[in-house]
Image (cartoon, rainbow, N blue to C red):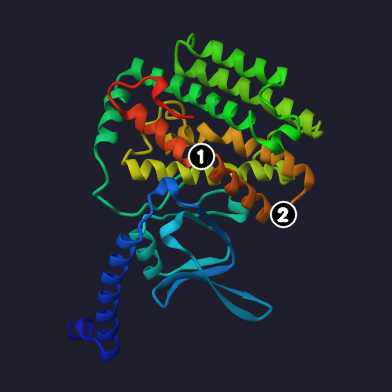
Amino acid sequence: MFGIIRKTNNQVGENISSLLYGAFVDRIVNLKSIIHSKRANLYFLEKCRVMVKDGRVVYLSEKSKQLNYWNIPIANTTVIILGLGTSITNSAVRMLASAGVLIGFSGDDCTPLFAGAEIEWISPVNEYRPTEYCQGWVKKWQDENTRLKLAKDFQKSRIDFIKKVWGKDKMFCENGINIKQDNFSSILYEFERKIDDAPNVTKLLQLEATMTKSIYKEVSTLIGIFDFVRDRESMDYTNRFLNHGNYLAYGLAASVLWCLGIPHSFAVMHGKTRRGALVFDVADLIKDAIVLPLSFILGKDGVSDVEFRKNCISFFIEYKAMDYMFNVVKNFSEENCDDSDISV
C-alpha cells in the first residue's frame, strides 16, 4: 500500500503545478472566451503531437529533421480533427475542453471519423449549458406530426441557404452555379413544392435524395466532369473533397448542438438509420450550398487537400454558416416559431 501512495518530490511538484496550471487555464479561457458562432478556426492535423507548452496548446511537427511548434488559438477554435500519425496529451485535452473545443479522431484526409462507430465527437464536459433549447426541442420532437414539420422546415431552410449563397457568390456564378440558372431553379422549386405534401419522413428522404442527385448531375455537367458518380470510397478529387468538406460541416453541426445542449439522438430526418443523426440534419443546412460546388470546382482544378480545406473554411466564415445553423436550431427549439423567424 505504501508503494502505491508514495510519491517522489518531483511527482509532488508536478501535481502542485498541475493544480495551479488548471486554475490558470480556467481563468484564461473565461477571460478570452469567444462565442462559438463567431469562432474562425477549424483544424485538421496529421503527423504531429498536440501538447501544452508555456501555457498554450501547440502542435509539434517535424520537417527536414527540425522540430517546429505551432500555436493553436483555442479561444477562437471550434473543432480539431486529428488524422493519421497524431497523438494528444492529457493536459492539451483538458485545456481544449475548458475552451469548449470539440475533438474528433479521423483517418486520412479527414475521413472517416473514428471517435465512435458513427459521426460522434469527444465533447467538452460542461453541465452549465442552457437547458431551454433541449427542453423545447424534445417537446416538439416527441410528437410525430410536429417532428415531421421540423423535418420539412429543415429542408426549406436548406433551400433558403442555397439560394442565398448561389445567388451572390462570384466564384460559383463564374462557373455557372447560379440560382437564376433555369435548371437549378426548377430543381429547387420542384423539391420545395413537394415538401409540404410528404406524408412521412421516408417520403421526404426520397424527395431529398432525388433533389441532391439532380443537383450533382447539373453541377458536374456545368463543371465538365461528365462521368461523375458519388462514391464515398472513391479517391478522385471531387469525391474526396465532398467527404472532406462534409466532415468539416459535421464538426460545425456537432459544436452547435453541444453549445445548445441538444443530444444527437433527437434527429428529425436520419434518426432511424444512423446514430448521431441530428448532426447530419444540421450539417445538411449548409453542405449543398458550400461544400458541393467547391468540391466540383476545386476538384476539377486538382488542388491540394490543404487548399480545399482553406477555401471551405473561408466560405463557412464568409457566409456565416455556423451562425445560420445556430439560428435555425435555436428558433426551431422555441415554442412559437415559424419559418419567418429565421434570418438568412
Looking at the image, is 187 positioned above or below residue 121? Answer: above
**Residue 233, position in %: x, y?**
66, 42
Residues at marks 1 and 2, CA–CA distance in whole angstroms: 23 Å
| Labels 1 and 2 touching (C-beta < 8 A) | no
Name which of mark 1 and mark 2 comes first in the sequence.
Answer: 2
Looking at the image, is 12 positioned above or below residue 209? Answer: below
| Residue drawn where x is 37% and y is 52% of the image | 123
Query: Comparing marks 1 and 2, which lies closer to the viewer?
Result: 1
How many marks can you see?
A: 2
**Residue 59, position in %: x, y?**
51, 69
In which image quadrant can residue 152 be found?
top left
Residue at the spot of label 2: 304
On-image quarter of the N terminus: bottom left
Q: Nearer the viewer, residue 168 or 143?
A: 168
| Residue drawn where x is 66% and y is 24% of the image | 179
Label ID, residue 321: 1
| Neighbour tally class for label 1: few under 14, some 14-19, many 20 plus, Cα within 10 Å | many
| Residue drawn where x is 77% and y is 48% of the image | 302
In which image quadrant can residue 21 be found?
bottom left
Q: Nearer the viewer, residue 228 or 24?
A: 24
Q: Nearer the viewer, residue 186 or 215?
A: 186
Under mark 2, the amino acid is Ser
